[in-house]
Image (cartoon, rainbow, N blue to C red):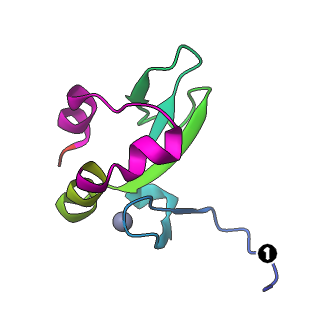
């Protein structure tokens, strides 16, 4: 394994590509089980990252990648909120 770098990278749940954290949107399953967008990146709970692009959002929605990553149902309002 390569030596760890100090640049924060996260993996998009839709395309599985690593990306600069700044270009990914964070979604969080809150302790109460509700999935919400987390633009601040500071909410507690289980997080998953997704590119804020129409392609990755559509893929994640169709394949339920985000639901699986978070083990929770993603509500339509979340998709509306993160849609570019
Ligand atoms: Zn992606």
67 with respect to 79 (left or right): right
Residue located at (54% from left, 13% from top) = 32
Q: Is residue 73 magenta?
A: yes
Q: Which residues are magenta?
A: 62-82
Above or below for 13 versus 48: below
Crowd class of label 1 (few under 14; some 14 to 19; many from 20; radius 10 Å): few
Decide: is 38 above or below 48: above
Classify the position of the N terminus by image quarter: bottom right
55 relative position to 71: left or right: left
Query: Is 55 part of what is drawn in magenta?
Result: no
Tell me what residue is drawn at x 49 percent, y 66 percent. 20
* The quadrant where residue 50 appears: bottom left
Q: Give whichever of 49, 76 is nearer the camera.
A: 76
Residue identifier under label 1: 4
Q: Quadrant of residue 53?
A: bottom left
Where in the figure is residue 45, as x and y percent of width and height? 61, 28
Indicate the secondary structure of the residue bearing disc 1. Answer: loop
x then y, percent, for residue 5 = 74, 74
């Amino acid at each position: 394994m390569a030596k760890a770098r100090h640049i924060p990278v996260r993996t998009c749940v839709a395309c599985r590509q690593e990306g600069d954290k700044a270009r990914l949107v964070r979604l969080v399953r809150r302790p109460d089980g509700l999935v919400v967008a987390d633009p601040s990146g500071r909410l507690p709970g289980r997080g998953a990252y997704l590119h804020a692009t129409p392609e990755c959002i559509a893929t994640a929605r169709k394949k339920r990648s985000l639901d699986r990553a978070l083990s929770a149902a993603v509500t339509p309002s979340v998709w509306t909120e993160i849609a570019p």
